Image (cartoon, rainbow, N blue to C red):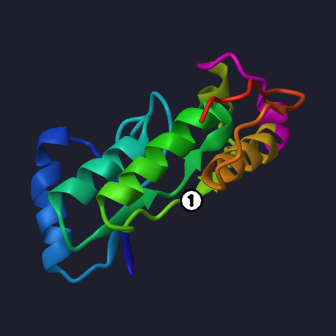
């Protein structure tokens, strides 16, 4: 069972993590929006903090709005968080819907579906050990040296 949270006061997060673990939840998840109180701009980073703070909890972004992020960075950061936590990362992605999130990044919200598909393919390919190049209508990642 997962506990979804909002971060209104970052200094209260440690107490909330402890309470979630003590209450018997299996995981703690964070949603992403930008410029909205309580939502974190980087749910993967927030989840990584939880994974380091609470050795019994799983944690993750639920979801990370993948069209707004560099998929290479997301793939690497998620793999690192999962490895360091002993496989406790829970990873969810979404296309997003709130136009303000996209406007703040200069991305056309109408491209979110295509961007999600391209970015998801890149993340999965990196996790499989593929080095690219990855070329799409919106994303272009050159060959990565192993």
Q: Nearer the viewer, residue 143 or 100?
A: 143
Residues packed near mark 1 inside 10 Å, few (<14), some (14 to 19) or many (20 plus): some
Is 32 above or below relative to 93?
A: above
Residue 70 location in percent, x, y? Answer: 61, 30
Residue placed farthest to the front in the image? Answer: 146
Q: Nearer the viewer, residue 65 or 138?
A: 138
Q: Does the magenta stretch include residue 26?
A: no
Residue placed farthest to the top in the image? Answer: 106
Asked whether residue 29 is in view, the answer is no
On the picture, is 104 further left or further right than 39? right
Mark 1 residue element: loop
Q: Mark 1 points at which residue?
A: 92
Residue 112 location in percent, x, y? Answer: 78, 38
Locate the C terminus by quadrant: top right
Task: Give the magenta-colored segment's residue range.
Answer: 104-114
The residue shown at (65%, 46%) is 126
Q: Which of 137 and 103 is in front in this view?
A: 137
The residue shown at (74%, 24%) is 142
Residue 63 location in percent, x, y? Answer: 54, 54
């Amino acid at each position: 069972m997962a506990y979804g949270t909002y971060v209104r006061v970052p200094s209260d997060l440690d107490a909330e993590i402890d309470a979630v673990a003590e209450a018997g939840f299996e995981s703690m998840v964070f949603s992403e929006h930008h410029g909205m109180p309580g939502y974190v701009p980087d749910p993967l980073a927030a989840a990584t903090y939880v994974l380091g703070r609470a050795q019994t909890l799983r944690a993750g972004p639920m979801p990370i709005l993948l069209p707004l992020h560099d998929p290479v960075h997301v793939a690497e950061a998620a793999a690192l968080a999962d490895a360091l936590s002993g496989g406790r990362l829970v990873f969810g992605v979404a296309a997003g819907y709130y136009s303000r999130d996209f406007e703040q990044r200069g991305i056309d919200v109408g491209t979110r579906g295509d961007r999600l598909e391209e970015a998801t393919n890149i993340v999965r390919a990196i996790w499989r050990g593929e080095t690219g190049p990855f070329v799409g209508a919106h994303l272009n990642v050159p060959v990565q040296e192993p």
